[in-house]
Image (cartoon, grey):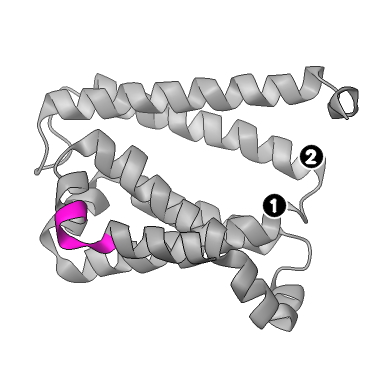
Amino acid sequence: MKYGLVLYIFLMLPPVANLAESVMAIHMHMQMTLFVVVGVLMAPLYQKKFPRFFERWNSNGVPGILLFMVILGYWLLPRTMDEALSIPAVELFKFISLPFLAGVPLRDSWGKLSNLGKNTLYVLLSVIFGVMAWLYIASPVQLCNNYLIIEQKTLGWGFVFFAVSIMIYFISTLIIDPSDYE
């Protein structure tokens, strides 16, 4: 919990936020990802404080994963990255939504999901990241007003890396039996 809070405060410091948002790939793949990690780290506190809420609202993990995917999908849009840089209310929404509406539900849901649910999420994320990679790499026009086309292509290749990494991990979970390492 305290690591999550320290990371959260650190990421919101104006010099840190400005530096992270100055490079498109760092903005998307590092800052936004770390805000989700903040939520994952802080989730146990909220699960202990509001156990009945999580039991009632997210008993099988599906509602939490759906909320996570909606928030993730929103922040993958090029326009929202632009608006986070030019509209303070949208940046504030980023600071709140990624940890608390994506990270916390992800942590709460992950243990409740079946293997089929987890495998579906791996494949879905790989496909989404693959589509985003294609969008950012293949687009002949600048998608974000605040970033250059070369930064856009770099971001796209970052999405390729994440999509391939998730698929490699997913395939390894199908091949390797975790009980072999206990």
* Residue type (three-letter) at the residue carrying disc 2: Leu
The relative height of residue 64 versus residue 57 in the rendered view (above or below) is above
Q: Secondary structure at mark 1?
A: helix
The quadrant where residue 112 appears: bottom right
The relative height of residue 115 versus residue 110 in the rendered view (above or below) is above
Q: Residue 121, percent across and down?
A: 64, 40
* Residue type (three-letter) at the residue carrying disc 1: Trp
Residue at (33, 65) in percent of width and height: 9
Residue at (21, 57) in percent of width and height: 84
> The C terminus lies in which quarter of the figure?
top right
Q: Is residue 36 left or right of residue 66?
A: left
- Of residues 46 and 64, the one nearer the viewer is 46
Q: Is residue 94 left or right of residue 119?
A: left
Magenta-span inclusion, residue 165: no
Q: Residue 53, percent across and down?
A: 69, 81
What number is the disc on residue 116?
Answer: 2
The relative height of residue 37 versus residue 178 in the rendered view (above or below) is below
Q: Is residue 97 left or right of residue 145?
A: right
Q: Which span is picked out in magenta?
A: 12-16
Give the main secondary structure, helix, strand or loop, of the magenta stretch: helix
Q: Secondary structure at mark 2?
A: helix
